[in-house]
Amino acid sequence: MKSVIVYYSMSGNVCMVAEEVAKHLGADLLEIKPVKAYPDKGIIKFLWGGKCAVMGETPKLEPYTFDAEGYDTIIFGTPVWASNITPPLRSFIKENADALNGKRVAAFVCYAGGGADKAIGKLKALLGVATLAGELILVDPKDKPQAEHLSQIEAFCHSLAD
């Protein structure tokens, strides 16, 4: 079973988890990036990112290569912005909606302030699915490492390997 991890990471937390999951599952990595980067410092980071997430924006992405036919499982990774998934992930899903239809889908989110369950719910709604093959929620795993993070990642990977 071949898997790909499609992720957006601003501060490195999601990237760290994506790399760890890829290592455990032998999955491919596809980092998506908006053409115009978001502010990544100070209060403007939260105001601008939160506004874009709440408004459901879909920014233009840097070119990427993705062929859903080559994968059985698609794993999405995103930070939580204002109880929502990030706009770049929304763009990717909308651009590939037909190709994602019927695929086994899982997700992990990283957050600092809350709203992770709501973000997962909004991801499910965007994908048009009632459940995900696996879900993982972590609080700032790179910035605030905790011993249980690795075991949570391993359990998430184990659930997808079944």
Image (tube, grey):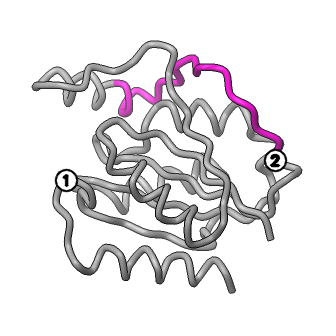
Rendered position, 63 above or below 6: above
Q: For the N terminus, give its image quadrant.
A: bottom right
The answer to the question of whether label 1 and label 2 lie on touching residues, with beta carbons closer than 8 A, is no
Q: Check residue 93 for magenta coloring.
A: no
> Label 2's element?
helix
Depth order, front residue of 29/88: 29
In the displayed structure image, the side of residue 81 where residue 157 appears, left or right = right
Report the disc number at residue 68: 2
Residue 15: horizontal and vertical position, in percent?
42, 48
Q: Main secondary structure of the magenta part?
A: loop
Residue plotted at (62% across, 42% down): 30
Specify the quadrant of the image occupied by residue 9: top left
Q: For the C terminus, give its image quadrant.
A: bottom right
Q: Amino acid at mark 2?
A: Ala
Give the magenta part as a residue range.
Answer: 52-67
Q: Amino acid at mark 1?
A: Asp
In the displayed structure image, the side of residue 90 where residue 79 appears, left or right = left
Depth order, front residue of 12/156: 12
Residue plotted at (53% across, 60% down): 107
In the displayed structure image, the side of residue 133 where residue 7 appears, left or right = left
Residue under numbered circle 1: 143
Residue plotted at (52% across, 45% down): 7
Mark 1 or 2, closer to the camera:
1
Which of pointers 1 and 2 lies earlier in the amino acid sequence? 2
- Disc 1 from disc 2: Cα separation: 32 Å
Residue 23: horizontal and vertical position, in percent?
55, 66
Rendered position, 133 above or below 144: below
